[in-house]
Amino acid sequence: MKTKIFFGGLMAATLLTTACSDFLTEDPKGQLVPSSFFVSQDALDAGVNALYEKVNQLQSWTNPNYPQWQGDDITANPGSNKQACAELDVFSATNNNKGVTAAWNLNYTVIKAANLLIENAATTPVAEEEVNIALGQAHYWRAYAYYYLVRIFGPLPLITSANTSDLTPQLSSVEEVYNLIVDDLNKALVVPTEYGKAPRHHDGVDAYITRHGVEATLAAVYMSMAGYPLNKEGYYAKAAAEAKKVIDGASAYGYYVEPEWKQVYSMGHNYNKATVVGIDYSPINGSWDHDSQLTSCCRFEGLGDGGWGDAWGEIKFWKNYPEGPRKDAIYAPKVTFENGDREIVKTVDWWELDSEGKKVVDAYHPMFCIFTTNCDENGNEVAAPYDYTKSNYRGMTNGHRHRVIRYAEVLLWYAESLARSGGDLATAKRYLKQVREHAVNDVDNFTYMDGTTVAIDNMSADQLAKACLEEHGWEVAGNWCAMVTRRSDEFRMNQLKENFDYRVANQPITIVPGITAKESVSVVKSTWAGDNSIYIPYPDTEVEKNPNLVRK
């Protein structure tokens, strides 16, 4: 892609800072007044670009997404410099954890940028359609940021104005936060179904949020409201209705389930209609602020190619994962070692032992390869599905499009919501099979995580709902950039304690006959503390400024 998509320029430099609390206390002298800025289409576009610049930074690096390590799919290196990951992995994060702080600061920065647009875009002397597009982006991404925050922090300060004198806002309840999220998403529905030209549309996809993207997000939000902690089960019917709108529009718009699973996260198929909502990165200058920094994050340290090892695969989840093309695309089928000439010098199973019984791979865990790419003989990144038998690209940034919501997820959300709300089970079963068709070796028979196998055609509503939930977990395994991660699903179903209990017991798991393995990160706080274990602490820097940040 040749067009640099999202840089905020003057708007970003003059109107935005890095955190909500900083914004509330900043000195306005010498700054551009928003009301005098929104005077033309160019200015309005600059405001939207500034918003997307902050959206980029939500996922360009791993820190803001460390809370997703609580899910049973992702674990961490117990040593190295990965303590922040490890703390969250075992539900014992401190309030100065860099993942906690980044998650708070970066999402509130998006909220701040959205507030500026929401308060000022309507005064711009441009066509109503253009105002609606700008306001739709702002309402959507504010909702997105609050949706992320409420699922990891619980009660939140609701900041809905760019100009507020309240420096110590009270906490709003989880339900109040969700009410704002739904209101924002409904207001975002003014956006079009598709856009015509760059930067809003490029490489065959829409970079700006579309109406279908909003509808898909509403489906996910309603499912969250139906589950823990609100438990408004009637919202599953609302979720199904929103997901159906996306499905009904799929033929006209071109949404599809990727026929080759190896292409789902491939740089060779970076822009596609298998993705409903994506976050774009354009690595023209190799900027760590705006490019995806995830190329090396899953490769283990010590393999000779500069891997960071931020995320390891949990052993039990990998062991239960259904065999097929999807598993081979999410996890590296083998672990490879390279030398200084980018030559692969050793290829092993992750659990392999040498002749003396020592671990060949120090990590001794499954290795994700969602974000990993290959290189050519000159070290340049290759735009193709990842192939573990080829040399690994060592650059730390690239233009990988983050798949936030995929069409396959929408099908599963619809199917699960139908099953939980008394809907058409035959349709739900058909969509479950459609997702599985290119993912697993056995499409028709579903094996649950507990080892039980049931024919999909014979499933009851409860069995089908559970199957769709678990299938979604397989679909997003290791993708902490997804809007609904495996951790999110476990949270909605109030199942995080089950993951915690497994980690406390940490029994050896048989990998192959004669070889067992255990999770590497030990649980420090072995007593479950309910919401105080589920929710991460408010950052210490924010608590110092606002004494109302106390979870009751």
Image (cartoon, grey):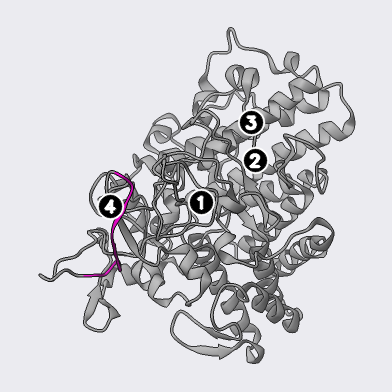
Choose mark 1 or mark 3, whichever is in front: 3
Measured in 3D between alpha carbons, the distance from the residue under mark 3 to the one under mark 4, in whole angstroms, is: 33 Å
Measured in 3D between alpha carbons, the distance from the residue under mark 1 to the one under mark 2, in whole angstroms, is: 16 Å
Measured in 3D between alpha carbons, the distance from the residue under mark 1 to the one under mark 4, in whole angstroms, is: 39 Å
Magenta stretch holds residue 164? no
Say which quarter of the image contains residue 320. Answer: bottom left
Measured in 3D between alpha carbons, the distance from the residue under mark 3 to the one under mark 2, in whole angstroms, is: 23 Å
- Residue that carries the numbered disc 3 in the rendered image: 4
Mark 4 Cα-neighbour bin, 10 Å: few <14, some 14–19, many ≥20: some
Mark 2 Cα-neighbour bin, 10 Å: few <14, some 14–19, many ≥20: many
**Of pointers 1 and 4, the one earlier in the residue sequence:** 1
Choose mark 3 or mark 2, whichever is in front: 3
Mark 1 Cα-neighbour bin, 10 Å: few <14, some 14–19, many ≥20: many
- Magenta residues span 341-352
Above or below, comparing residue 238 to residue 278 in the picture: below
For residue 154, the mark is 1
Mark 3 Cα-neighbour bin, 10 Å: few <14, some 14–19, many ≥20: some
Q: Is residue 231 left or right of residue 331?
A: right
Choose mark 1 or mark 4, whichever is in front: 4
Q: Secondary structure at mark 3?
A: loop
Q: Amino acid at mark 1?
A: Gly
Q: What residue appears at the point 46 percent right and 48 percent down from the top-left corner?
A: 65
Measured in 3D between alpha carbons, the distance from the residue under mark 4 to the one under mark 2, in whole angstroms, is: 40 Å
Q: Secondary structure at mark 4?
A: loop
Q: Amino acid at mark 2?
A: Arg
- Residue that carries the numbered disc 2 in the rendered image: 142
| Residue occupying the far left of the picture | 356
Q: What residue appears at the point 71 percent right and 55 percent down from the top-left corner?
A: 273
Q: Secondary structure at mark 1?
A: loop
**Number of marks:** 4
The image position of residue 198, as x and y in percent, is 75, 35
Q: What residue appears at the point 65 percent right and 12 percent down from the top-left corner?
A: 32
